[in-house]
Amino acid sequence: MTSYTRRFFITAAAVIGFSTLAALPVDAQAASVVEAARNALPDPLKSSSTLKVATSLQWPPFAYMDEKGEMEGIDIRLVRLLGEKLGLKVEIEDVKFPSIVPGVSNGRYDVGVNQIGITPERAKVADFVPYLISGFSLLVRKGTTGIDVYNLCGRTLALTQGSGQIPVAEKLSAQCVQEGKKEISFLFFPNSADTYLALSNGRGDGFLVGKPAGVYIAKSNPKLEMTTSVLKDSQTIAGIVIAKGNTALQKALMVALEDAVADGSYHKILEEFGVPDAALTVEQIHEYAKQ
């Protein structure tokens, strides 16, 4: 993680809208194919031999462009790993964050990843394969004092459109009102890169963010820093998005992920990005998939 630089933020605007393909030939993956996972795939996907993935490359350490101009991140490595275990080429497209879930739902993509939190609202329109747990903290401009996740009443939060932070922020604002305090105001931005930039430039008092992502951002941007408090009961379970009712693909991905847990490749990814405590057990993966 320490080798990554501020170049991500300098080039963020150029990244928006960029799309590319990231794939490995099926024959190069054959040695790692998990037959039980491969056999569980829906026939059309098995025939196409390509897993189409939607993400937004504005969200380190989960999905972003590295200093070499290549796709990198926890989610990028995970979908490539699972694709290998399924014997599929992995084709990744960079889209705007709010387009990920609809794009999977309408069949344009097979799956979507971007540390997408599993919420009741999203569960109505999509299914998930859970793979990571994280709690919310607050990213602020460096030198800001007197504010954290427990002191937001009357403040203004910068939020990314369509993100899982929105319902959390709305709940916190409602609690402020119930306590007779001033509500929290919100500023919305189309993607994460714009949200960081706005906060750096003085728009909003803070940005609710999962602790792993916040720590990475703060290390990469000298204008920002993380507060220490983590919001109690704010644990978010991130999942790979699948079209509602596509039980065959969900089962195939679950089997592949279980194999990655068993052989250590799943944990290796999280450890390399400094978030080993974000791992789920096989039991938790199944438990959260039912919610």
Image (cartoon, rainbow, N blue to C red):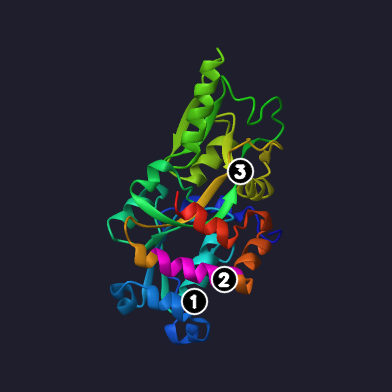
- Quarter location, residue 26: bottom left
> Identity of the amino acid at label 2?
Ala
- Quarter location, residue 270: bottom right
> What residue is shown at x 52% (from left), y 16% (from top)?
178
> What residue is shown at x 63% (from left), y 54% (from top)?
278
Q: Position of residue 37 (x, y in %)?
A: 44, 75
User: In the displayed structure, would residue 109 be above or below residue 290?
Assistant: below
> Identity of the amino acid at label 1?
Lys
The boundaries of the magenta stretch are: 250-261
Q: Quadrant of the N terminus?
A: bottom right
Mark 1–mark 3 distance (CA, rounded to whole Å)? 29 Å
Q: Position of residue 80 (x, y in %)?
A: 50, 70
Residue that label 1 marks: 85
Q: Are marks 1 and 2 in contact (CB under 8 Å)?
A: yes
Tag 2 or tag 1, which sits nearer the N-term? 1
Q: Badge 2, how many Cα within 10 Å: few under 14, some, many 20+?
A: some
**What type of secondary structure mainly makes up the magenta span?**
helix
